[in-house]
Structure formats: C-alpha cells, structure tokens
Image: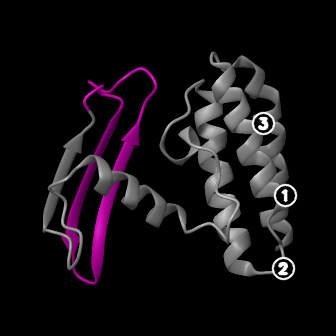
Amino acid sequence: MGTRDSVEFKNALRDIAQFTHQLNSPFDRVRCVEWTRKLASLSDDDLETSRIKNEYIQLLRIQVRNNFLHGPFVDPPTDVGKLCTLSECLGNIMAKQIPYLPRVGPVSPILYHKSPDGRAYISAKQVPGGVFCYMAVSPDGLK
C-alpha cells in the first residue's frame, strides 16, 4: 500500500475506534469491529486490494461518525476470498432491493430512487463514455 493510502487507512481506523462506542446498537458495535478486523487483515501488497480496503473503511468511517450502519456493514464480512469492489457491492445491494433495475446489459439512461425511509437517494444518468451516478445518504433523512 502506498504511504498516503496507509496513512488514510490508519486515520480512518482511529476515527472509527473513537466513535464506535457511540453506536446505539450493540449489534452495530460488533459489526463495526468485525469489519475493521476484516479490513485490517487484508494484505497491503496488492494495489487493488489496498484501494478496496480504503473504499470500505472510508464508508464505514462516515457511517460510524453518523451513528448509523447500513449497506454492506449490516451483515458480517465474508471469510472466503477477497472483497469485491465497493461499487459492485453497493450495486448488488441495490439490485436486490430494487427489483426493476436491469440485471444485465447497459444501465437505462436515467435512474432515480429514494429509499422508503428517506435516508438514501440515488440517481444515475448515462453520459458519453460512461455513467454519472449521484448518491446521497443521511442519517436524518433527505428532504
């Protein structure tokens, strides 16, 4: 792992350690510890693995600071194999919860979804050369 990536990862771990005890649910505290152990145990030798580690740890950091775990952190981490990229993980979670999303093929030109509890919003639009995706998450709900 590069020096900058390593420093970012360690800073995120410190932040998570500082705020984990403030999580309301003891189950969330356990999940947080399981995920930090899993992420810390992943090898730093591979650039792809270190990038994936940092993506997950930064999302976990944001969630812990806001006293609310969701997405991949609701379930314990898998022990088998390496983690998929965060974007793939979140895409799989969205596909399970939104049955009308296309499973195979190109993303439809415009996608808009707001979670039933009002805490998450996602919008995607096809642009030349790819897809522009906007996601917002708030523990207090979005207006």
Q: How busy is the neighbourhood of tag 2: few (under 14 within 10 Å), some, or many (20 plus)?
A: few
- Image-quadrant location for residue 102: bottom left
Residue that mark 1 sits on: 7
Residue that mark 2 sits on: 45
Q: How busy is the neighbourhood of tag 3: few (under 14 within 10 Å), some, or many (20 plus)?
A: some
Marks 1 and 2: in contact by CB < 8 Å? no
* 123 drawn magenta: yes
Q: Say which amino acid is labelled 2.
A: Asp
Q: Position of residue 62 (x, y in %)?
A: 60, 38
Locate the N terminus and report the quarter of the image it occupies: bottom right
Q: Position of residue 46 (x, y in %)?
A: 77, 81
- Give SS at disc 3: helix
Between the C-alphas of marks 2 and 1, the distance is 15 Å
Q: Say which amino acid is labelled 1.
A: Val
> 143 or 30: which is nearer to us?
30
Marked residue nearer the N-terminal end (1 or 3): 1
Q: Residue at x 83, y 72 (%)?
A: 44
Q: Say which amino acid is labelled 3.
A: Asp
Say if 62 sits above or below 4 in the image.
above
Q: Position of residue 71 (x, y in %)?
A: 48, 44
Between the C-alphas of marks 2 and 3, the distance is 24 Å
Q: Residue at x 66, y 21 (%)?
A: 23
- Give SS at disc 1: helix
> 68 or 73: which is nearer to us?
73
Residue 15 circle label: 3
Q: Tell me where the magenta segment starts and ends, as one range.
A: 116-143
